[in-house]
Image (spheres, grey):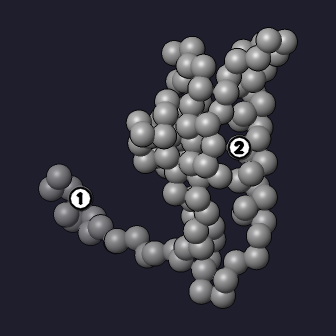
Amino acid sequence: MKKTFELSHPKIAYPRLIEATKSEIKKYLKRERNKALPEYADFWGFDCKFGQTEEQADVIHVAEINDKISFAESQAWLTFYLEILAAPTQRTKREVVDEENEDDL
């Protein structure tokens, strides 16, 4: 999904437009997560960008999308750009930190 969301409408209130965009994004993520995974993948990862325009878009984590939309609402933006690209991903092992070394920090 690469989309510029318009947040102005003559009949729909601004907060309702914000809720509608959040709902549309949530539905898109659910639809993408339900697609069949390739054999080598464990889950669907998402590469996301958010900004006022496509040129100003910064890379964000998928969990930050609602916070960024709320920020746009607080700044009264009339448009924002959101890019979400699904990619099959494998889980990676976390590094185990020694408890002894943890005390030294």
Residue 42 in view in this figure:
yes
Instruction: Name the spot of residue 80 as percent of width and height, x first.
Output: 57, 31
**Residue 12, above or below 92:** above
User: Which residue sits at x=53%, y=77%?
Assistant: 90
Instruction: Name the spot of residue 105 as percent of width and height, x first.
Output: 17, 52
Residue found at the far left of this picture: 104
User: Which residue sits at x=68%, y=22%?
Assistant: 7
Disc 1 crowd, CA 10 A, few/some/many (<14, 14-19, 20+): few
Disc 2: which residue: 25
Q: Nearer the viewer, mark 2 or mark 1?
A: 2
* Residue closest to the eye, 100 or 66: 66
Q: Earlier in the sequence, mark 2 or mark 1?
A: 2
Disc 1: which residue: 102
User: Which residue sits at x=49%, y=46%?
Assistant: 49
**Residue 48, above or below 38:** above
Side (left or right) of 14 relative to 43: right
Kindly identify the amino acid type of the residue bearing the numbered disc 2.
Ile
